[in-house]
Amino acid sequence: MAVLKIARLGSPVLRQIAAPVEPDTIGKRVFQQFLDDLLDTMVETDGIGLAAPQVSRSEQVVVMECKGEHGFPQTILINPVIVGYSPATAESWEGCLSVDNLRGKVRRPVGVRVTYLDRDGKSVELDAAGLYAVCIQHELDHLIGKLFLDRMTDFSTLTHLEEFDKYRRAEHAEVI
Ligand code: ZN
């Protein structure tokens, strides 16, 4: 198990366009170990999603998992592309391991269709809705150098974690 260091707001790697993964490398042991390290880091930091640029590796790799009733299964996306968005949008609270201690409301489509390679190198097409879809969009933004702050249209909701806990505990926010 290895917990990797999280790149934080201001680190140039968070603003770069991530390179696609060469499919031949997916089966290699060192790459599989990297995927496990990403998962370990996400779990250890209480996140529900983590993109490779967040550990200073500018590659198109995302890991996600959210346990619980409204969660989603462990998902590993390599070279992901969103190929469809639902017309309906909704606002939800977002946080980010790279933007620690802040939460803000972001409006995004409520559903997406995404294609990617899984950790076996198999091509997958997935339809996701709700928190799963929000997380996919948030994480894929990391692969094009975007943070949830860039997606906020109203900064009046930007909230420090302590104030969030005090005033908005009833409203759900996940760190992705
Ligand atoms: Zn993030």
Image: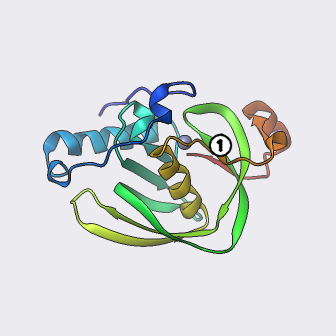
| Quarter of image, res 114 | bottom left
Q: Which residue is mark 1?
A: 150
| Quarter of image, res 76 | bottom left
x and y, in percent, of residue 117 in the image: 29, 61
Q: Could you tell me which residue is drawn at 38 percent across and 42 percent down? A: 18
Q: Could you tell me which residue is drawn at 29 percent across and 43 percent down? A: 36
Q: Could you tell me which residue is drawn at 42 percent across and 41 percent down? A: 17
| Quarter of image, res 10 | top right
Q: Is residue 95 left or right of residue 30?
A: right
- Residue closer to the observer: 20 or 50: 20
- Residue closer to the observer: 94 or 144: 144
Q: Is residue 103 left or right of residue 59?
A: right
- Residue closer to the observer: 152 or 35: 152
Query: What amino acid type is highlighted by mark number 1?
Result: Asp
Q: Quadrant of the N terminus?
A: top left
- Residue closer to the observer: 147 or 16: 16
Q: Residue furthest front?
A: 17
Q: Could you tell me which residue is drawn at 32 percent across and 38 percent down? A: 37
